[in-house]
Amino acid sequence: MRKALFSVPVKIRYYDTDLSRAVYFTNYIKWFDSIALPDFTETLGIDWRTFLEENVDAVVAHAAFDYKAQCFLDEVVDINITDIDLGRSSMTIYGALYKDETLIAEGKLVYVFIDFSTRKTLPIPEPFKGKIISHIKKVRS
């Protein structure tokens, strides 16, 4: 397994599960989008509020996940960012979720950067792009 660019643990709570007592499948995507990415960018010193003040945001344009195993209440899942592809105005973040050494789910989210006042695409902000590239080089070297 390739070293993750970032990893964060999530403890499964009651509200994450469905009637079968397993994690409801959409929660894996939710965790990846709403926990892993903000925590990752924060560790790189990226303050998303700065972008928002400039009317810049990133929206999910595509989500694809494959589910391999189930998780249950009180277990801990590690959310890993495994790779990132940067385009002109889009960013694809690849991830894998593990419980111990067991692969639970893997997939990707594609974000498109936009001016949220006009809803038109924008190039990825250079400070953001630079910090991401620098971190990837550091981890991969």
Image (cartoon, rainbow, N blue to C red):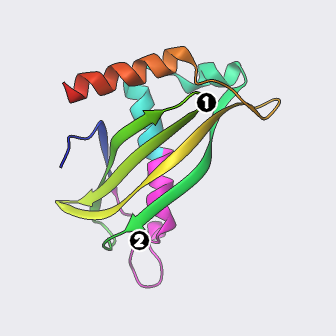
Residue drawn where x is 30% and y is 73% of the image: 69
Outermost residue toward the bottom? 20
Circle 2: residue type: Val
Kindly state the secondary structure of the residue where label 1 is placed: loop
Instruction: Give the residue at mark 2.
Output: 23
Residue 133, given in percent of the width and then of the height, sits at 38, 22
Residue drawn where x is 23% and y is 28% of the image: 139
Mark 1 vs mark 2: in front: 1
Mark 2: few, some, or many residues within 10 Å (few <14, many ≥20)? Answer: many
Kindly state the secondary structure of the residue where label 2 is placed: loop
Residue 7, given in percent of the width and then of the height, sits at 29, 42
Can residue 83 be spotted in the picture?
yes
Location of residue 83 by image quarter: top left
In which quadrant of the rendered image does the C terminus lie?
Answer: top left
Outermost residue toward the right? 118
Is 53 colored magenta in this rendering?
no
Residue drawn where x is 41% and y is 56% of the image: 107
Is 29 colored magenta in this rendering?
yes
Mark 1: few, some, or many residues within 10 Å (few <14, many ≥20)? Answer: some
Location of residue 4 by image quarter: top left
Residue 102, given in percent of the width and then of the height, sits at 20, 64
Residue 75, given in percent of the width and then of the height, sits at 27, 65
Outermost residue toward the front? 88
Circle 1: residue type: Ser
Left or right of 53 on screen, residue 24: left
**Looking at the image, is 109 positioned above or below residue 69?**
above
Instruction: Give the residue at mark 1.
Output: 89
Give the residues in magenta: 11-34
**Looking at the image, is 31 positioned above or below residue 47?**
below
Residue drawn where x is 45% and y is 39% of the image: 37
